[in-house]
Image (tube, rainbow, N blue to C red):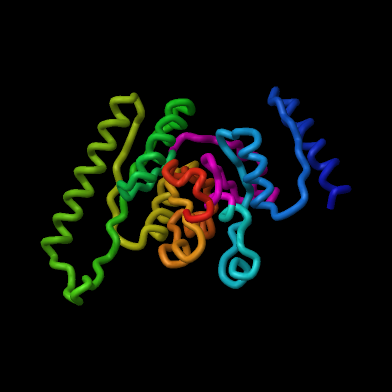
Amino acid sequence: RMSDASPRLAEFKHGAYARGIAVTTRIATGMPSEEIIAAALAEEADLMIVGTRGKSGLAHVLLGSTAERVIRMAPCPVLAVHTLKEESLTGKGISLDRILVPTDFSECSEEAVNFAAVVAAQAKASIELMHVVEPGYYSIDFTIEHPDERVQQRQRSTEQLEALSEKLSKAGIAVEMNLRGGTPSDMILDVAKTTSSDLIVMGTHGRRGLLHVVAGSVTEAVLRRGTIPVLAVRNPAFSGRFSDA
């Protein structure tokens, strides 16, 4: 409600000022995701930060997720932060020491790696580069993937990870490599948990409509099921193409 929003925004603004942060506020009415995107475009934002409760199952099907819709349409990177219970924050500060960066070596993944490098350099954090080799499937002629092809695929992936790691190392960033086999979202969440990652940086194509339903989104699966902040970096090739992305 409008009567509730104004004092809450004033409270947030006061807290930010106390930390030396300049703040402007805005109240809009309409579809949340559309209004958020409109504000980002109007302000020429470099980064958007949204909260998410990580709904799944029926609740997600019925209600959807404002954070996910924002990520699909955003004109800039989006940091999605999970809502935590107040007691879980007691005595725990926010740190950024270890960044997990999954990559499938696509163009949008490359953008995510580059963005993560900037964040890591500024925060003096380390990066863990990760690639997941998905399980073999039947090919179009219904033949099963040959074991030799699997070995060659892992070798190519290792070489690509090494090339990216070398690039980051030359930029003065501490980096580790992690090659896994399995379902991408499962492996990303497992590694993030076991290595105590503070942030996951992922690329996203910003797909919508039928293409999104068919292709799905590893980024959204990680966002929905995990508890670690996710920074989604949208492929600039899709910027301004919200209608057909």
Is residue 167 visible in the rendered image? The answer is yes
Q: Which residue lies at the image location 64% right of the left edge and 52% below the top edge?
A: 33
The answer to whether residue 212 is above or below residue 142 is above
Where's residue 184, x and y in %?
37, 58
* Left or right placement of residue 60 versus residue 26 in this view: left
Residue 27 lies in magenta, yes or no? no
Residue 94 lies in magenta, yes or no? yes
* Left or right placement of residue 238 versus residue 27 in this view: left
Single out the residue that lies furthest toward the left.
Answer: 148
Of residues 52 and 227, the one drawn nearer to the viewer in this rendering: 52
Where's residue 155, x and y in %?
17, 50
Is residue 196 visible in the rendered image? The answer is no
* Left or right placement of residue 88 versus residue 205 in this view: right
Q: Which residue lies at the image location 43% right of the left edge and 67% below the top edge?
A: 214
The answer to whether residue 73 is above or below residue 217 is above
The magenta region covers 70-98
The answer to whether residue 107 is above or below residue 137 is above
